[in-house]
Image (tube, grey):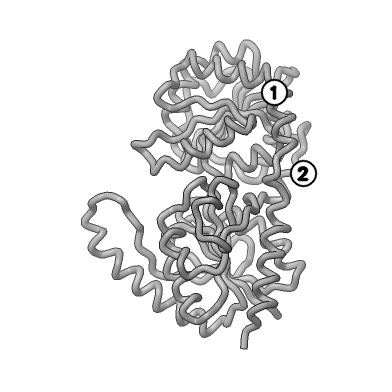
Amino acid sequence: MKKIILTGGGTAGHVTPNIALMPRLKELGYEIHYVGSYEGIEKKLIEELGIPYHGVSSGKLRRYFDFRNFIDPFKVVIGYLQSKKLMRKIKPDIVFSKGGFVSMPVTRAAAKKHIPVILHESDMTPGLANRLALKKADKICCNFPETSKTLPDGKAVVTGTPIREELFKGDKEAAKKFCGFTDDKPVILFIGGSSGSQIINDNLAKCIDTLLEDFNIIHLTGKGKANKENANKAGYVQFEYIKKELADLFALADIAVSRAGANAICELLALRKPNVLIPLSLGASRGDQILNAASFEKSGYSKLLKEEDMTPDTLVSAIKEAYNNRENYIESMSKSQQSDAITKITELIETLVNKNPVK
């Protein structure tokens, strides 16, 4: 049986694309193993699926001064040695990495053993872990066509980002019942990222009554960020975190308000959901969300609202503009070439495995 190691972690965005690939990989006859950190979000997500999970030591790749920067390189070295041991034990045909700091020792160990390595980059510009792994990788799958132009010739393949198939199977009526909505107002879905967004939550709280005049609202607040004052407002429902019912909520939503993480916006694109994107500011990120959102706005997929420009009034205005022009956004999204990523990526995996059989 062919074997594949999937790796990536630190945030849900470094895990869910790997999860999206698993059903097709199983169909193709792969034995799947996952390598992640000991305590990262990936551990819980993968173990729930019954996939063999292997924890290794990992150190965060920080771009700022921190005393832990003197300790974490040693953790990476330990993780590298552990990963080499796993390569000998599992004998994978290929390694597929979604990035995140835990992936670096894994990809390095695979390359040292001459095991093919494929990276995947969802953002416009590669993250630090992928940049460090790029030299040893065989291929890097890109989400944006613009990204491929900045990478070494022959390594980049534009595939888009894998989307979980269950997201396309949502039940609109089930979601309406789940949320307790009794009228037919259009629905806004607020998504603040895997941890929620306090600044989006705060601005929504200040304009919620205005929005509720025309819309019902589903609000994914993030853990520990629920607003008790608004909890009982008619037409408004909030969840700190949602998993099982997410596909249903997407089916019910007419428009989404979201951060601009690559996986989140690719889900909106695949589902053809008109949206307002509020990227993390440059001070709170490396700027990848700003570039992602700008690309989606340029392509006609999204309405961009910069975090520094967000007020309750500008938030309401952006939402109404996106909703009123929703047919134009849907038409633009329907023409996107960033689709069928699962097929493109698994075909690339098969090509490299057949080209480099394990001896």
Q: Is residue 23 left or right of residue 277?
A: right
Q: Is residue 81 visible?
A: yes
Q: Is residue 331 left or right of residue 318?
A: right
> Which element type, helix, strand or loop, lies under badge 1?
helix
Q: Between 241 and 13, which is closer to the camera in this rendering?
A: 13
Q: Nearer the viewer, mark 1 or mark 2?
A: 1
Q: Residue at x 39, y 43 (%)?
A: 286
Residue 80 drawn above or below residue 126: below
Could you tell me which quadrant the C terminus lies in?
A: bottom right
Q: Residue at x 44, y 21 (%)?
A: 310
Could you tell me which quadrant the N terminus lies in?
A: bottom right
Q: Among all residues in the image, which is located at the extreme bottom? A: 359
- Amino acid of disc 1: Arg
Examine the image and state in which quarter residue 17 appears: bottom right
Residue 253 drawn above or below residue 242: above
Q: Residue at x 70, y 77 (%)?
A: 354
- The number of callouts visible is 2
Residue bearing the label numbered 2:
169
**What is the CA distance from the residue labelled 1 to the residue labelled 2?**
21 Å
Numbered label attached to residue 326: 1
Q: Residue at x 66, y 68 (%)?
A: 349
Residue 285 percent location from the top left of the image:
39, 41
- Amino acid of disc 2: Lys
Examine the image and state in which quarter residue 96 appears: bottom right
